[in-house]
């Protein structure tokens, strides 16, 4: 059997060459539309039938009883004219193509280097986050963190005893294991991300939800499907089994209105009154969400900002600006913004993301750079705070991480400070000139 070390060497030697050749293809796949598909949110479930007939559409999927649908045009006709026409329908709250999503590292083709178990625990990130001080008060026990990614290696020692059942939304089965090999662009991405949540919040439970394939590509429908599963895995709003934190180290340059609506459901930010169409959750199909939120504080959503080294390219869902959502950039060991990290007014804060060591499939460790690494470190910190404040609303928890962050040098962005967030105090001055 191929050893973990050999598999990682293969990734470096062969994968780097293949990934370099695949740069444009990966970026194109990340921004593509699924042909003929559209995502539709209606005012009520009763409106679906007439619209299917009028626009010659077929139903692909529905979110339980909610009036949210994945539809497909009948035949090979371009669905964009239908989308434009449906947008004018009074019972259509939103309609848009089903866009692809991917991990930022798949889009930029950043390969990892070999890491070690010692580097995993002794790297610069824990000290930068001041984890030792935070862990004196909490390790995140009782908190559940959903990781929406490429899956996870269930046998990895760093994740032993920390994984919940999860689900695979790519193959649609109960096994969210990583699929593929070291020749695939994003193989190991989910295991690496999960290992960073475990590093920051070793007492938390991790819910692996596979939404990206071996090339690190998924789509908007699968993503929102997994978000709703994360907050209510058994589809019973009266049981306490949902995620308190959702990590998404993935994204697209295309905004999806449905993501914003689902984020409100996940974060329990369902408006009491309908002041605009996007706030219309009056259909009985949302009753289960309202029942869940009556006894839940909602999930904090953490999303990677992207690796485009600019403020001109926004990555979604990070740039959605949704209730309870944190857009996370990457910092380096010099207390500066990492050169590859996206930035701009839509990025809320940063976390260590350059040269970060974590678990990879096969029991090994790898060192990777990207905002995908920064996001789970922030998500783990959110889990630490939630463990001490179980009734804190998602938006307030996200705000605390931002307000009690530490300064980075040369940028307006600030970095997550786990000790300050847990202790609810301002962090010390880091000495930037």
Image (cartoon, helix red, strand yellow):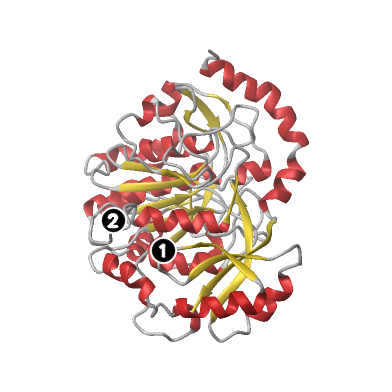
Regarding residue 259, the answer to whether it shows in the image is yes
Place residue 159 in its image quadrant. top left
Instruction: Give the image location of residue 383, x and y in percent.
Output: 32, 49
**Observer-nearest of 98 and 421:** 98
Q: Residue at x 49, y 54 (%)?
A: 303
Regarding residue 430, the answer to whether it shows in the image is no
Q: Residue at x 56, y 48 (%)?
A: 337
Instruction: Say whether disc 2 or disc 1 marks the residue closer to the N-terminus.
Output: 1
Disc 2, SS: loop
Q: Residue at x 65, y 24 (%)?
A: 12
Instruction: Give the image location of residue 210, x and y in percent.
Output: 48, 43
Could you tell whether 400 is left or right of 340 in the image? left
Q: Which residue is mark 1?
A: 64
Question: Dot 1, how many residues are within 10 Å of its Cα: few (below 14), some (14-19), or many (20+)?
Answer: some
Instruction: Give the image location of residue 283, x and y in percent.
Output: 39, 78
Q: Which residue is mark 2?
A: 425
Could you tell whether 343 is left or right of 326 in the image? right
Question: Dot 2, how many residues are within 10 Å of its Cα: few (below 14), some (14-19), or many (20+)?
Answer: few
**Observer-nearest of 51 and 219:** 51
Q: Nearer the viewer, mark 2 or mark 1?
A: 1
In this rendering, the answer to whether 164 lies above or below 224 is: above
- Marks 2/1 in contact by CB < 8 Å: the verdict is no
**Observer-nearest of 425 and 243:** 243
Q: Residue at x 41, y 41 (%)?
A: 174
**Observer-nearest of 166 and 350:** 166
């Amino acid at each position: 059997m191929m050893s973990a070390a050999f598999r990682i060497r293969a990734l470096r030697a062969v994968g780097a060459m293949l990934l370099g050749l695949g740069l444009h293809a990966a970026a194109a796949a990340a921004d593509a539309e699924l042909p003929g598909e559209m995502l539709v949110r209606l005012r009520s479930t009763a409106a679906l039938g007439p619209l299917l007939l009028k626009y010659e559409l077929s139903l692909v999927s529905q979110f339980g009883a909610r009036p949210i649908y994945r539809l497909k045009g009948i035949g090979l006709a371009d669905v964009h004219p239908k989308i434009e026409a449906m947008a004018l329908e009074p019972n259509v709250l939103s309609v848009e193509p089903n866009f692809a999503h991917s991990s930022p590292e798949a889009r930029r083709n950043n390969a990892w280097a070999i890491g070690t178990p010692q580097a995993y625990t002794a790297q610069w990130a824990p000290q930068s986050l001041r984890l030792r001080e935070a862990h004196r008060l909490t390790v995140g026990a009782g908190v559940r963190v959903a990781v929406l990614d490429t899956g996870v290696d269930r046998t990895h020692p760093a994740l032993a005893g920390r994984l919940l059942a999860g689900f695979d939304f790519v193959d649609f089965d109960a096994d969210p294991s990583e699929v593929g090999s070291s020749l695939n662009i994003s193989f190991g991405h989910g295991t690496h991300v999960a290992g960073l949540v475990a590093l920051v919040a070793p007492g938390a439970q991790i819910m692996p939800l596979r939404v990206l394939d071996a090339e690190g590509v998924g789509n908007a429908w699968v993503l929102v499907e997994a978000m709703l599963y994360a907050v209510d895995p058994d589809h019973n709003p009266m049981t306490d089994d949902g995620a308190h934190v959702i990590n998404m180290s993935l994204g697209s340059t295309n905004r999806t209105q449905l993501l914003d609506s689902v984020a409100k459901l996940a974060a329990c930010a369902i408006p009491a009154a309908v002041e605009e169409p996007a706030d219309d959750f009056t259909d009985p199909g949302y009753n289960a969400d309202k029942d869940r939120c009556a006894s839940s504080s909602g999930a904090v959503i953490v999303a990677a900002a992207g690796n485009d080294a600019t403020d001109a390219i926004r990555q979604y869902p990070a740039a959605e600006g949704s209730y309870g959502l944190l857009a996370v950039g990457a910092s380096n060991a010099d207390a500066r913004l990492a050169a590859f990290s996206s930035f701009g007014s839509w990025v809320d804060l940063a976390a260590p993301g350059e040269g970060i060591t974590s678990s990879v499939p096969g029991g090994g460790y790898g060192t990777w750079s990207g905002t995908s690494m920064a996001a789970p470190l922030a998500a783990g910190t959110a889990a630490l705070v939630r463990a001490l404040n179980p009734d804190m609303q998602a938006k307030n928890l996200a705000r605390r991480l931002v307000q009690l962050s530490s300064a980075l040098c040369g940028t307006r962005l600030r970095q997550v400070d786990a000790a300050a967030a847990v202790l609810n105090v301002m962090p010390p001055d880091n000495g930037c000139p």
